[in-house]
Amino acid sequence: EVQLVESGGGLVQAGGSLRLSCAASGFTFDRWVIGWFRQAPGKGREGVACITRKDTFYPDSAKGRFSITRDSAKNTVYLQMNSLKPEDTAVYYCVADPGVCWGPEYWGQGTQVTVSS
């Protein structure tokens, strides 16, 4: 059974940083695509970072501020978020898929990130 458990969300002031963690299990960690999506109140889900075996991908809204990394020894993926803005406020979800970045099959339960102005 695929399991994705997020942690690290919270309240931060604008300009601050947070690091989200995603503990993964139930699949071959190094072979799958893992990423992060978010959903702000009243908006649809948006992909903000994706890591494959070789590359990382970000939308324009996250480039230069967010960084996704994976630790194979811990089966954990991290999302480092810097220079946070109030518009980054959302529930952040860890996602995983055998081969797709932006249409993942598996989702975690989400962790709330709130950025105050």
Image: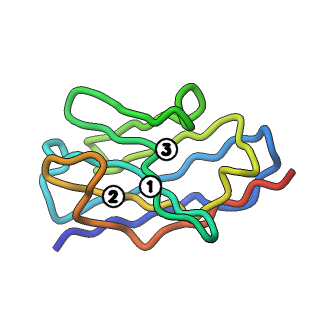
Percent x, y of residue 17: 69, 41
Residue at image mark 1: 37
Amino acid type, residue under disc 3 in the picture: Leu
Secondary element type, mark 2: strand
Q: Earlier in the sequence, mark 3 or mark 1?
A: 1
98 to 40, vertically: above or below: above
94 to 55, vertically: above or below: below
Residue at image mark 2: 95
Seen at 43% across and 73% down, the residue is 109
Secondary element type, mark 1: strand
Q: Is residue 64 left or right of residue 99?
A: right
Percent x, y of residue 12: 77, 53
Q: Earlier in the sequence, mark 3 or mark 2?
A: 3
Residue at the extreme right of the image, as rendered: 117
Q: Earlier in the sequence, mark 2 or mark 1?
A: 1
Seen at 54% across and 66% down, the residue is 111
Question: Where is residue 27, by image quadrant?
Answer: bottom left
Task: Find the distance from the CA under tag 3 to the CA under tag 1.
Answer: 11 Å
Task: Find the distance from the CA under tag 3 to the CA under tag 2.
Answer: 12 Å
Labelled pair 3, 1 in contact (Cβ < 8 Å): no
Labelled pair 2, 1 in contact (Cβ < 8 Å): yes
Q: Is residue 106 left or right of residue 10?
A: left
